[in-house]
Amino acid sequence: MATEINGIPEVVEGTAFYPHILVPNEAFGRKMYEINLAVSDDIFDLFQSQGYIGLHPAGKKKFTPDPVIAFQRFAFRKDGSPNPTPKLVDMENNPVDVSIGNGSRVKVMWRHSTYKSGGGGMIQRAELVAVQLVELVEYAEVNDGDFDMAAVEF
């Protein structure tokens, strides 16, 4: 029987977008390990009913028509010490070191995290623990604007 957290499966499957699993994302003035996971309506509703943050209803994100859950882990604790890096494994649970491209099919293991917000209230976050690759779409660097002159005809 699968483990649940607040009535939600501890492992959820979906399509990955903008994953930062082994190297934290440093955008927006904070360092976070994260993955945006396009999920089914049923899974999204379970997280929404429990009051988790990082939820984007269907149609709200330009990269997918599906609902999205942002699983995140701060790279550093409040005291400045590093948090463990989330695990990234293949289907046999062997550690892998690959860059995951948008559209990859993955399973995300998460845990419940509660902490105080800047305004003093409590926030519930689905904290990223591990990612298992189901179907990898390899990450491809975006062309930086340099032309391959041999391929350009005028």
Image: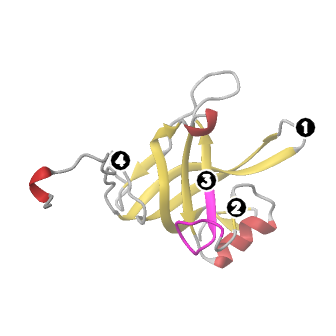
In which quadrant is the N terminus drawn? bottom right
Which of the 4 image quadrants contains residue 37? bottom right
Q: Are marks 2 and 1 in contact (CB under 8 Å)?
A: no
Let me know if residue 62 is in the magenta part.
yes
Q: Give the spatial CA distance, label 3 vs label 1.
A: 22 Å
Residue 13: percent from the left, percent from the top?
A: 52, 68
Quick one: label 4, few (<14), some, or many (20+) residues within 10 Å? few
C-alpha separation, residue under disc 4 versus residue under disc 3: 20 Å
How far, Cα to Cα, is label 2 from label 3?
9 Å
Q: Which residues are magenta?
A: 60-70
Mark 2 and mark 1: span between their CA atoms? 21 Å
Q: Earlier in the sequence, mark 1 or mark 4?
A: 4
Task: Tell which circle, 3 or 1, labels the residue nearer the N-terminal end.
Answer: 3
Marked residue nearer the N-terminal end (2 or 1): 2
Sooner in the amino-acid sequence: mark 2 or mark 3: 2
Residue type beneath disc 2:
Leu
Q: Secondary structure at mark 1?
A: loop
Q: Which mark is residue 95?
A: 4
Q: Say which residue label 1 marks.
A: 120
